[in-house]
Image: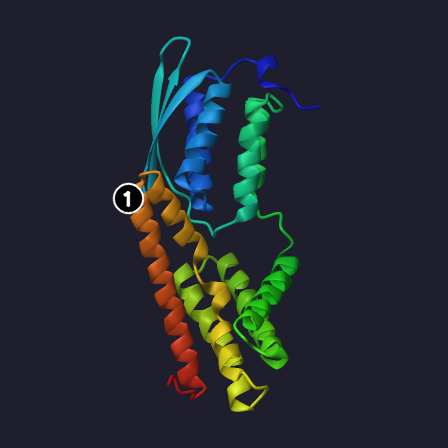
């Protein structure tokens, strides 16, 4: 049975600050918006009888914690964790903040739970691979592709996304990953044009790389802008633009390799 916060000695301001700083670094790194980070952290701090102030920057987070009982104050600066965007980690870390706030988990158990969350993604990678391929094939149909084009896009996405999983596990730079995956998917997507497969081969080529479009950084950028985190919003927007350029480089490279004209 889980211990509750009320049943154990309340952690010191320093312990809370260290925990929150690591929590913030992982939550922001895995793709959370600034407003979600602020709400989750304030929820955790209140559960331990403390107050917290955050200064969120694109590469670092400044955390200050005050103990409401004796006004002790502790400050920490932590580097944001460079990890792939993960809905699974984002959700589980948010659930952890609610478990702490509701008193369903003690401080030591919260440490162990956070370590378990950040050590690895609990999602089934094969299922994610299959669903991503099906989703991208559905985009092909949405843009007017026929059944043959959908099959081509499914195969192109399957190969490209699988390569993406492998390269990210090997800690490749995400920009290089986008170029490599876009190149592979566009090469496979161009087979419909070379072999005259179906009636919409150009739609298959165009949609074969849509799974790489950085929608999450763009949405997070807009959210951060709404809540006046302008520095983070601009940083995330630039990251999205850079990734889009990497996607385009890979796509153009694949088209040139397969001798498929752009116009």
Let me know if residue 54 appears in the view.
Answer: yes
Q: Residue at x 62, y 47 (%)?
A: 122
Q: Nearer the viewer, residue 16 or 54?
A: 54
At 42% from the left and 82% from the top, the residue drawn is 255
- Residue at horizontal 54 percent and vertical 44 percent from the top: 89
Residue furthest out toward the right = 1
Among the 4 quarters of the image, the one containing residue 141? bottom right
- Residue farthest to the top, as pictured: 70
Depth order, front residue of 32/122? 32
Q: Horizontally, is 215 left or right of 55 in the view?
A: right
Along the viewing direction, whichever of 196 and 63 lies nearer the viewer: 196
Rendered position, 174 above or below 143? above
Residue 173 in view in this figure:
no
How packed mark 1 is, by other alpha carbons closer than 10 Å (few <14, some 14-19, many 20 or more), is some
- The residue at the point 49 percent across, 82 percent down is 202
Where does the C terminus fall, quadrant-wise? bottom left
Secondary structure category for the residue under label 1? helix
* Horizontal and vertical percent position of residue 98: 56, 29
In this rendered view, identify the residue nearer to me: 234 or 79. 234
Q: Quadrant of the N terminus?
A: top right
Q: Position of residue 249 (x, y in %)?
A: 37, 73
Q: Position of residue 75 (x, y in %)?
A: 33, 25
Mark 1, residue position: 231
Instruction: Look at the picture and state if 233 lies above or below 130.
Output: above
């Amino acid at each position: 049975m889980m211990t509750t916060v009320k049943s154990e000695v309340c952690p010191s301001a320093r312990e809370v600050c260290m925990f929150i700083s690591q929590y913030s670094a992982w939550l922001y790194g895995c793709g959370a918006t600034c407003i979600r980070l602020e709400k989750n952290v304030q929820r955790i701090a209140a559960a331990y009888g403390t107050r917290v102030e955050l200064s969120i920057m694109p590469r670092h987070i400044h955390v200050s914690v005050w103990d409401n009982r004796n006004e002790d104050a502790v400050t920490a600066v932590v580097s944001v964790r460079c990890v792939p965007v993960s809905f699974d980690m984002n959700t589980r870390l948010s659930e952890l903040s609610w478990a702490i706030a509701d008193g369903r988990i003690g401080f030591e158990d919260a440490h162990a739970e956070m370590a378990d969350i950040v050590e690895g993604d609990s999602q089934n990678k094969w299922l994610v691979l299959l669903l991503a391929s099906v989703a991208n094939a559905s985009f092909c149909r949405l843009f007017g592709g026929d059944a043959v084009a959908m099959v081509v896009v499914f195969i192109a996405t399957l190969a490209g996304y699988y390569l993406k999983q492998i390269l990210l596990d090997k800690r490749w730079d995400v920009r290089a990953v986008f170029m490599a995956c876009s190149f592979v998917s566009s090469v496979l997507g161009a087979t419909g044009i070379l072999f005259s497969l179906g009636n919409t081969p150009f739609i298959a080529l165009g949609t074969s790389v849509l799974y790489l479009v950085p929608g999450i950084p763009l949405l997070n950028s807009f959210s951060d802008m709404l809540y006046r985190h302008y520095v983070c919003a601009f940083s995330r927007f630039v990251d999205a633009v850079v990734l889009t350029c990497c996607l385009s480089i890979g796509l153009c490279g694949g088209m040139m390799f397969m001798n498929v004209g752009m116009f």
